[in-house]
Image (cartoon, rainbow, N blue to C red):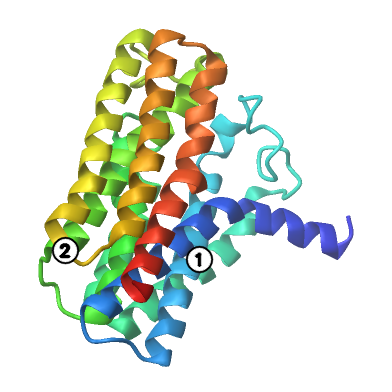
């Protein structure tokens, strides 16, 4: 295998799409924090990019390594580089993963000890109790870690403020919607791999009811951000309303017609189209308007 294709395999292990989304929302959080607080330096901006990019890529690579046996039993994931043995033995990926995690944590520590501990919590959360119900709860910690690192890269101190709490709640509600719809859409694939944890051990109809409720709560949280904070303007309000209407309608549609295709639509919709756009609009709104 050529060196070029070998490097593509290593990059694929790091889940570049997921890493890009985490980096994006983390940088948005950093810019929002800078506008609300004291501004930022070019050094902090560069360091927060390194902390989130390296840390997220390393954490995603670690989850791919830990999940390789289960991934090999699933149609959706069996062609990933580790289960497909394009990187063999899989331990060959560990030096890169460890280097990225170490670089991310060092960069986070340079920003502040608060960022270091948030980043460390995110990496630990993403690597323990894999493929269990705890994955959803731990996924909330891992998913919110880049957002909180971005925020506290500016403030430097562990003060509890209302705005980052709202951002954390958004991730906390978004995570099960995103993860559970993927599992519903690929239920047979998960079950054939021997996985039975929630929501796989419940009927789809029961889980979908929870998803509908979560979509309404997520809409309430994102809209409350406008009414409670007073720092956002009409652009955020309008786009937030549109995005949440789309997500709620998609959830209701899944409830009325619980087929895999409708679950997959919500999974794809909830990634960048929802989370990415809403963070982008928050940033644009607070800086320009």
Look at the picture and state if 222 lies above or below 190.
below
Residue 286 on image: x %, y %: 31, 70
163 left or right, relative to 46 = left
Residue 194 on image: x %, y %: 49, 17
Q: Dot 2, how many residues are within 10 Å of its Cα: few (below 14), some (14-19), or many (20+)?
A: few
Q: Which residue is mark 2?
A: 230
Instruction: Give the number of the mark in front: 2 or 1.
Output: 2
Q: Which residue is mark 1?
A: 98
Is residue 162 in view? yes
User: What's the residue at 42%, 33% (across, down)?
Assistant: 246
User: What's the residue at 29%, 79% (across, down)?
Assistant: 34
Q: Nearer the viewer, residue 241 or 25?
A: 241
Quadrant into which the C terminus falls: bottom left
| Quarter occupied by residue 154 | bottom left
Q: Nearer the viewer, residue 253 or 146?
A: 253
200 left or right, relative to 152 = right
């Amino acid at each position: 295998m050529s060196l070029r294709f070998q490097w593509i395999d290593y990059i694929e292990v790091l889940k570049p799409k997921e890493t890009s989304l985490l980096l994006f929302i983390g940088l948005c959080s950093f810019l929002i924090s800078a506008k609300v607080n004291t501004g930022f330096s070019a050094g902090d901006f560069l360091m927060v990019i390194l902390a989130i990019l390296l840390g997220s890529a390393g954490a995603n690579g670690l989850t791919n390594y830990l999940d390789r046996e289960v991934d090999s039993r699933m149609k959706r994931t069996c062609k990933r580089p580790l289960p497909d043995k394009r990187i063999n033995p899989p331990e060959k990926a560990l030096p890169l993963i460890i280097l990225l995690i170490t670089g991310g944590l060092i960069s986070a520590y340079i920003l502040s000890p608060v960022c270091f501990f948030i980043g460390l919590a995110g990496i630990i959360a993403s690597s323990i109790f894999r493929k269990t119900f705890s994955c959803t709860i731990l996924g909330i910690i891992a998913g919110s870690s880049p957002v909180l690192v971005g925020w506290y890269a500016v403030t430097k101190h562990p003060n509890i403020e209302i705005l980052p709490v709202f951002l954390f709640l958004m991730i906390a509600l978004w995570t099960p919607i995103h993860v559970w719809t993927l599992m519903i859409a690929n239920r047979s694939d998960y079950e054939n791999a021997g996985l039975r944890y929630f929501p796989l051990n419940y009927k789809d109809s029961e889980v979908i009811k929870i998803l509908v409720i979560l979509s309404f709560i997520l809409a309430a949280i994102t809209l409350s951000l406008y009414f409670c904070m007073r720092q956002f303007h009409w652009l955020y309000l309008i786009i937030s309303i549109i995005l949440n209407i789309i997500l709620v309608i998609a959830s209701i549609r899944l409830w009325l017609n619980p087929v895999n295709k409708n679950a997959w639509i919500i999974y794809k919709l909830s990634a960048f189209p929802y989370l990415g756009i809403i963070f982008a609009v928050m940033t644009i709104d607070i800086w320009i308007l």
